[in-house]
Amino acid sequence: MTEFVPTDEAPEVPARLVDDFVPDLIDVGTHNLCPGCGEPIAMRCAMEAIAELGLTQRAVAVFGIGCYAAFSNNLDLEVLQALHGRAPSLATGVKRARPDTIVLTIQGDGDMVSEGLQEVLHTAARGENVTCIMLNNGVFGETGGHMTATTVLGQRTKTSLDGRDPALHGRPILLSSLLAQIDGAAFVARGAVNSAGSVARTKKLLTRALNSQVQGAGFSFVEILTMCPTGWFIETSEAPQYLESHLAAVHEPGVLKDLMAS
Ligand SMILES: Cc1ncc(C[n+]2csc(CCOP(=O)(O)OP(=O)(O)O)c2C)c(N)n1
Ligand code: SF4
Ligand SMILES: [Mg+2]
């Protein structure tokens, strides 16, 4: 029988703050996300990319709904909260009303692919000059770790504790691959945050995507694979390797499309 870590009670050993470093554009160093969660790392990459490109005063972040929304109250940026899956449409409205802004969405796989797939597809097809960012952990993390449309075969979730079974649950949607085929998409890439190297590469992808928006190239998209040890029901320390062997083996990191490079 598959072993899993119960998450219905607090762990015996409480979380320890590793450092009191506060990244650029994140107002406070603490957040209420789980120890070992990949989302704060992804948020830091995005905020550092904005700050380093000098876009802070022009940036508007449109949030989906998921654990990452914990950051919507402590970013030193203009922030809007969208309904589930609707962030790309709200971002479209902001950008059309204020073309001088740099507009990004922060969404999860549950929000973007399970609940709002048509929104991001149409936004890409219209070639809207916005940047959508999807934090992909393959689960509805905030509501308890249920399977989403991106959960890979064999991945453990609350609704597939023995792993996603294609006969029972169907197969994952590889959103970046889909978006790369859409004409209005100018830049599509997938990164991860499970190692120092992948974090550095992800920050470069975010920088490239935001730069493509500055150039007016059209729709840009960065998917970031993030650890969710709580929703995967595994030990925190195992999550980076689990991401590598399960999620990254299917949702392969890399640049899928870059019109500015061609
Ligand atoms: C219309 C609607 N359906 C469901 C929910 C419950 N809900 C809130 S957050 C969430 C999970 C979002 O998952 P994801 O976007 O993958 O973010 P994560 O928590 O994994 O970072 C769900 C299902 C809701 N708030 N509204
Ligand atoms: S449930 Fe998962 S995504 Fe949510 S804070 Fe915890 S580790 Fe992060
Ligand atoms: Mg998720």
Image (cartoon, grey):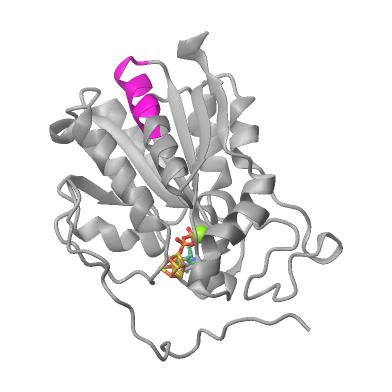
**Residue at left offset 50%, top offset 40%:** 191
- Picture layout, residue 176 above or below residue 243: above
Numbered range of the magenta stretch: 206-216
- Picture layout, residue 133 above or below residue 181: below
**Residue 215 painted magenta:** yes
In the rendering, at what x and y percent does residue 200 appear?
39, 38
**Residue at left offset 42%, top offset 46%:** 196
Quarter where residue 18 is shown: bottom left
In the rendering, at what x and y percent does residue 46 appear?
32, 41
In the rendering, at what x and y percent does residue 153 appear?
75, 58
**Residue 209 painted magenta:** yes
- Picture layout, residue 60 above or below residue 208: below
In the rendering, at what x and y percent does residue 123 appear?
48, 32
Let me know if residue 40 appears in the view: yes
In the picture, which quadrant includes the N terminus? bottom right
Q: Horizontally, is 12 left or right of 114 in the view?
A: left
Which residue is more in the foreground, 150 or 100? 150
Which residue is more in the foreground, 252 or 106? 252
